[in-house]
Image (tube, helix red, strand yellow):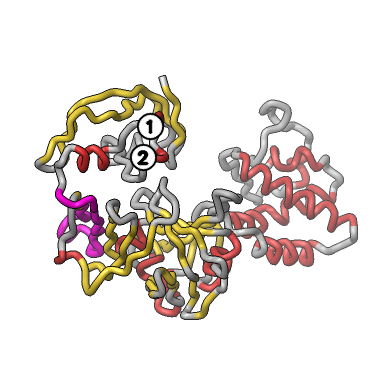
């Protein structure tokens, strides 16, 4: 029995061995994991049956030889190279193509810019800078370690730089929006409860954001201070909701003690919500601002690889139902392993990528 930690989560399973067919070739005696535990919905809900790792054997579990190494060792491919093309045109022409043993010249324009692999494991290389609207951030003065990874959907990097980018494109963290919505809906109710000297520990359970004493019903007679016309909903009790509620109640309690008015308190809290750090999860943007957002570029091998707003923003729906999410998310990996950037599918969709195993280098060219 083995337990393996993957990007998607921790899985459990067994090592097995069998022949595996990829396209028109058969890899003999390939080791793989038969997963018996797949937490979360990434694997369970995905429209695929498994994951093929194409990193180096240095990060392979129990020194199992990766499928790509076996392809080459068994003389199934002529060149020690594979390439990725991800379709930019939605459902037209399929989702993309991976070629083992070469490249398809119809899938890229011009020539590839190659950079050496700096550390075996993932496909890691040095990045020279990150630019916002053509202006260098100066965040890579001593080079930035970057990884190109088809298994990552978004673009991830150190919080300090991602915060600059998300600020430049007007991204609002979902936590920020939740905070403002909470203050708008429940602020006046909390103010009245606190003004009647109700125990602060009972307020969040009463409005449905926390449990009290093992989920016992709250019956402290505080309903009398809330008008029947006030609509007090009871959203799902989750840790983030409870933490947010307790923080706001604590702040309001302090401000009331300092004789601040209700209007002043609610205005101050609304402004404080804007300062909530953009979370590790999604950050919303206004779809109408796409034409005015800056380009974001990565300098690799002395060449700038830019992404336009429609390439780094994830848009779903149309018209009034449209929702737009920033494709940039913070990822802080402490030294000595980090900090790292991960250039995922949003980058690879724009740039055809060549993984040159024989020469230990990675190449990028404009995708066709």
Mark 1 surroundings within 10 Å by alpha-carbon count, few (fewer than 14), some (14 through 19), many (20 or more) = few
Relative side of 103 to 135, left or right: left
Q: Residue at x 29, y 36 (%)?
A: 50
The magenta-colored residue range is 78-98
Q: Residue at x 14, y 66 (%)?
A: 106
108, above or below 234, in the image? below
Q: Is residue 318 visible?
A: yes
Q: Residue at x 34, y 38 (%)?
A: 45
Which quadrant: the N terminus? Answer: top left
172, above or below 178, in the image? below
Q: Residue at x 33, y 28 (%)?
A: 33
Relative side of 22 to 177, left or right: left
Reply yes or no: does residue 86 show up in magenta.
yes
53, above or below 189, in the image? above
Q: Is residue 321 visible?
A: no
Give percent across and percent down for residue 296: 44, 72
Which quadrant: the C terminus? Answer: bottom left
Give the farthest residue toward the left. Answer: 24
Give the farthest residue toward the right. Answer: 258
Q: Which mark is residue 57?
A: 2
Reply yes or no: does residue 343 show up in magenta.
no
- The quarter of the displayed image where residue 35 is located: top left
Give percent across and percent down for residue 140: 54, 68
What residue is disc 1 on?
A: 63
Relative side of 91 to 59, left or right: left
Q: Answer yes or no: do the residues labelled 2 and 1 have beta carbons within 8 Å?
A: yes
Of 318 and 78, the residue lying toward us: 78
Q: Which mark is residue 140?
A: none
Of 256 and 304, the residue lying toward us: 304
**Disc 2/disc 1 C-alpha distance (Å):** 7 Å
């Amino acid at each position: 029995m083995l337990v393996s930690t993957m990007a998607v989560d921790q899985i459990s399973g067994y090592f097995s061995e069998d022949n595996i067919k990829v396209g028109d070739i058969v890899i003999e005696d390939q080791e793989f994991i038969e997963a018996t535990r797949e937490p979360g919905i990434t694997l369970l809900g995905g429209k695929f049956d498994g994951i093929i790792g194409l990193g180096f054997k240095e990060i392979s579990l129990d020194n199992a030889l990766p499928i790509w190494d076996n392809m080459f060792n068994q003389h199934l491919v002529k060149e020690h190279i594979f390439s990725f093309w991800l379709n930019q045109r939605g459902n037209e022409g399929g989702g993309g193509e991976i070629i083992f043993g070469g490249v398809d010249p119809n899938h890229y324009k011009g020539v590839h810019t190659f950079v050496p692999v700096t550390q075996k494991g993932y496909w890691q290389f040095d990045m020279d800078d990150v630019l916002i609207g053509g202006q260098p951030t100066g965040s890579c003065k001593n080079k930035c370690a970057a990884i190109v990874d088809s298994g990552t959907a978004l673009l991830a990097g150190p919080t300090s730089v991602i915060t600059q980018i998300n600020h430049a494109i007007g991204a609002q963290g979902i936590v920020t929006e939740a905070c403002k919505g909470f203050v708008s809906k429940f602020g006046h109710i909390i103010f009245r409860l606190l003004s009647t000297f109700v125990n602060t520990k009972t307020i969040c359970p009463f409005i449905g954001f926390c449990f009290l004493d093992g989920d016992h019903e709250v019956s402290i007679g505080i309903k009398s201070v809330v008008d029947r016309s006030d609509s007090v909903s009871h959203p799902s009790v989750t840790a983030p909701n409870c933490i947010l509620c307790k923080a706001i109640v604590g702040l309001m309690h302090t401000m009331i003690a300092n004789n601040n008015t209700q209007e002043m308190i609610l205005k101050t809290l609304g402004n404080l919500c804007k300062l909530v750090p953009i979370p590790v999860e999604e950050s919303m943007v206004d779809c109408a601002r796409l034409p005015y957002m800056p380009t974001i570029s990565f300098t690799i091998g002395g060449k700038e690889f830019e992404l336009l707003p429609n390439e780094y923003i994830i848009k779903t729906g149309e018209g009034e139902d449209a929702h737009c999410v920033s494709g940039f998310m913070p990822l802080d990996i402490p030294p000595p392993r980090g900090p790292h950037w991960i250039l995922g599918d949003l980058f690879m969709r724009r740039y055809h990528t060549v993984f040159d195993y024989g020469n230990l280098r990675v190449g990028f060219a404009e995708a066709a």
